[in-house]
Image (spheres, rainbow, N blue to C red):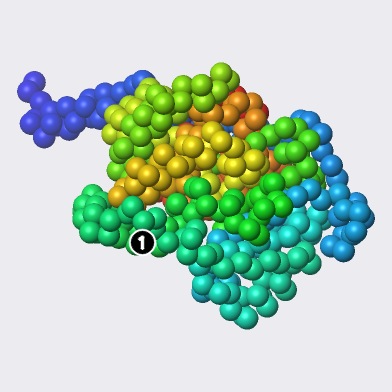
Amino acid sequence: MAIARPVRTLGLLAVLLWCFFLYQMFKPSTSVFTPGARYMNFERDPMLDPTGEPDGILVRTSEKYAPDAEDSDRVAATLLALVRNEEVDDMVASMVDLERTWNHKFNYPWTFFNDKPFSAEFKKKTQAATNAKCIYEVISDEFWQPPSWIDQDKFDASAAKLEKQGVQYAKMMSYHQMCRWNSGMFYKQPALKDMRYYWRVEPKVHFFCDVDYDVFRYMQDNNKTYGFTINLYDDPKTLPTLWPETQKFLAKHPTYLHEQSAHKWVTDDIKRPEHNLAAQGFSTCHFWSNFEVADMEFWRSKVYEDYFEHLDKAGGFFYERWGDAPVHSIALGLFEDKSKIHWFRDIGYQHIPFFNCPNSPKCKGCVTGRLTDGEAFLHREDCRPNWFKYAGQG
């Protein structure tokens, strides 16, 4: 007996649907290759594992950390912010977070820098947010203005080209000045001449975890040069000649390359080969420097000063958009012992749109292990796995 055509059609559709269901059930997983995959960079994010305090010497709070303690246990260190008057409320919000989670126990001074005089409102609001001393400094033209060898016409032409390529802030001279200042000028400021360590804090950031040890003493007592929380890939369009200029510098100074460097992290071409190609040999991996705790003796060293001077003369802070994050990161990756670079996995931190959120009862207000609350493709920008691969977790 012949089967009616509608019945045959329905039967065929049912078979096709069943086949499609079986394929979806048993097809090889490709989730690790998709831009939005949570664990595309590694099988398990170590931030999901229980996080305690770092190994090594830890110094706790005591009466010697009182704001007016004469025989203080504080080392020569400061909390550091480059900030404008109009950012005062966002700056205060960052201060409140860090004071609540850490600095109310240790009372390290805050040093604020601006290329304009600070307003009375800024000083009043920021000083009210802390019991520690606040220092307000105006950056002189010597450290802020573009150097004499930068040609304005060339800058305008280069900025227009970068803007067409979608590079943010390309035409904003103050942004280029900020990148240069953060790269090679801030540690030369007279107000910091007696300081060795700094913790960079920006407006509109968040801190989530109680930290019960002196972070600066941790750096000093455990011989650490640099501390970070977030490690990302940069946009190659902002720095196409940064690595070629670095190679020129290395050719002149081959002995500057540290024998225990993280050179492979700087030059990796496996994880994001398209970035390495566009940046002419640089992986574009960098420590996100809106959070950094560092020993300024590294920046003041002859090796770094020579490197910065070479880059400064090349003009890329203005003709391209070299940021302090890749400049600092390349220098640390090449010229420092990688064991002296520390991942502060226990410090909960957010700078939109990325997080460092540990699995710890000391943390409140962030989601454990969350890298970003932005678009799914942003997970692709995580370069921590490469750092762990070449340098370990510290």
Look at the numbered disc 1 and give the secondary structure of its residue.
helix
Residue 76 drawn above or below residue 19: below
Could you tell me how many numbered marks the image carries?
1
Circle 1 residues within 10 Å: few <14, some 14–19, many ≥20: some
Image check: 60 left or right of 153? Answer: right
Image check: 11 left or right of 124? Answer: left
Which quadrant would the C terminus be assigned to in this image? top right
Residue 190 drawn above or below residue 55: below
Residue at image mark 1: 173
Image check: 197 left or right of 64? Answer: left
Q: Residue furthest bottom?
A: 120
In terms of image quadrants, where is residue 19?
top left
Viewer-closest of 31 and 11: 31
Query: Could you tell me the amino acid type at mark 1?
Result: Met
Rendering coords of residue 62 (x, y %): 90, 51
Viewer-closest of 92 and 26: 92
Q: Is residue 331 visible?
A: yes
Residue 84 drawn above or below residue 302: below
Q: Residue at x 75, y 53 (%)?
A: 102
Rendering coords of residue 391 (x, y %): 57, 24
Viewer-closest of 80 and 153: 153
In terms of image quadrants, where is residue 359?
top right
Which quadrant would the N terminus be assigned to in this image? top left
Rendering coords of residue 88 (x, y %): 58, 72
Rendering coords of residue 238 (x, y %): 33, 45
Q: Residue at x 67, y 53 (%)?
A: 193
Residue 286 drawn above or below residue 319: above
Q: Which residue is drawn at 22% across and 25% down?
A: 15
Q: Is residue 371 visible?
A: no
Q: Which residue is drawn at 71% across and 72% down?
A: 127
Image check: 272 left or right of 140? Answer: left
